[in-house]
């Protein structure tokens, strides 16, 4: 929780930041779920709103599993826009509606995925957030044993670049957290996570 909160505060100061953990979006206010004990992005959003650091926050959840916990906690908070792009037929099998959900069919490829993301981001930025919390899940990867989508490593890089560039172009601070990743071998999951931070670093240098 502290790492994600620190990343959000750093993003507000420098424009972009990240936590090497986090992304625990299945936990609800009352129980653990899906390997998640506490919901870090919900905690961050509610803390920053409580402290009046910002007034409008968007969560861009690109884990392959729908962000049911975040939706459960943040529904009823009009200051937060939750967007989840996920596998329609994947866990959780009872989904809690986000502000915007886009469910993809099994086997969705790069073009399908990125087209859906563009639609979702249009809605996110129409909300005019003062901070974007980006859950950069890597389980949409085609080699992921729990993902059921067919997004390539290059597709994930294009996804990350799209989200980050759109935030930077609008001068909206963005804090990213990691999420998901169950490839065999695990090296591909690690590679995908590292790639996300390399994209962020390249944009900061640019």
Image (cartoon, grey):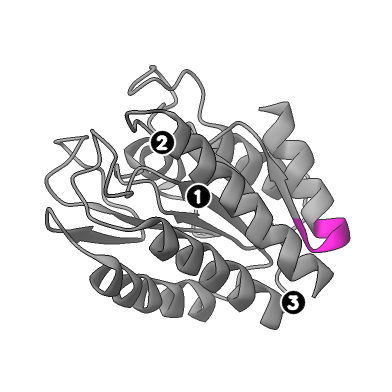
Predominant secondary structure, magenta span: helix
Q: In the image, residue 69 lies at what x, y percent? A: 38, 35
Between marks 1 and 3 in the image, the one whose residue lies nearer the viewer: 1
Q: Could you tell whether 142 is left or right of 70 in the image? A: left
Is residue 80 placed above or below 167 in the rendered structure? above
Is residue 121 placed above or below 84 in the rendered structure? below
Alpha-carbon span between mark 1 and mark 3: 19 Å
Determine the residue positioned at 44% across, 25% down. 29
The earlier-in-sequence mark between 2 and 3 is 3
Determine the residue positioned at 33% across, 23% down. 34
Q: Could you tell whether 66 is left or right of 51 in the image? A: left
Residue 120's mark?
none
Determine the residue positioned at 65% across, 40% down. 44
Alpha-carbon span between mark 1 and mark 2: 8 Å
Q: Is residue 61 visible?
A: yes
Q: Can residue 170 be seen in this view?
A: no
Q: Could you tell whether 186 is left or right of 59 in the image? A: left
- Residue labelled with disc 2: 180
Numbered disc 3: secondary structure: loop
- Which corner quadrant of the image does residue 181 belong to? top left
Residue 171's mark?
3
The earlier-in-sequence mark between 1 and 2 is 1
Numbered disc 1: secondary structure: strand
Quadrant holding the C terminus: bottom right
Magenta-tinted stretch: 12-16
Is residue 99 placed above or below 87 in the rendered structure? below
Q: In the image, residue 56 lies at what x, y percent? A: 62, 63
Q: In the image, residue 159 lies at what x, y percent? A: 46, 66
- Residue labelled with disc 1: 136
């Amino acid at each position: 929780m502290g790492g994600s909160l620190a990343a959000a505060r750093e993003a507000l100061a420098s424009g972009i930041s990240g936590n090497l953990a986090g992304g625990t979006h299945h936990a609800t206010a009352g129980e653990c779920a899906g390997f998640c004990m506490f919901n870090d992005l919900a905690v961050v959003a509610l803390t920053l709103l409580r402290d009046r650091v910002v007034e409008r926050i968007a969560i861009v959840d690109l884990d392959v599993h729908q962000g049911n916990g975040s939706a459960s906690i943040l529904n009823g908070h009009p200051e937060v826009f939750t967007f989840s792009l996920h596998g329609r037929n994947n866990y959780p099998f009872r989904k809690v509606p986000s502000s915007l959900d886009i469910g993809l069919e099994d086997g969705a490829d790069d073009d399908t995925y990125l087209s859906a993301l563009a639609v979702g981001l249009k809605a996110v930025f129409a909300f005019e957030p003062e901070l974007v919390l980006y859950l950069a899940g890597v389980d949409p990867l085609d080699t992921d044993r729990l993902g059921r989508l067919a997004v390539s490593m290059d597709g994930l890089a294009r996804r990350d670049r799209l989200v980050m560039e759109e935030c930077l172009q609008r001068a909206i601070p963005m804090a990213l957290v990691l999420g998901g990743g169950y490839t065999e071998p695990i090296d591909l999951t690690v590679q995908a996570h590292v790639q996300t931070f390399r994209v962020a670093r390249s944009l900061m240098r640019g």
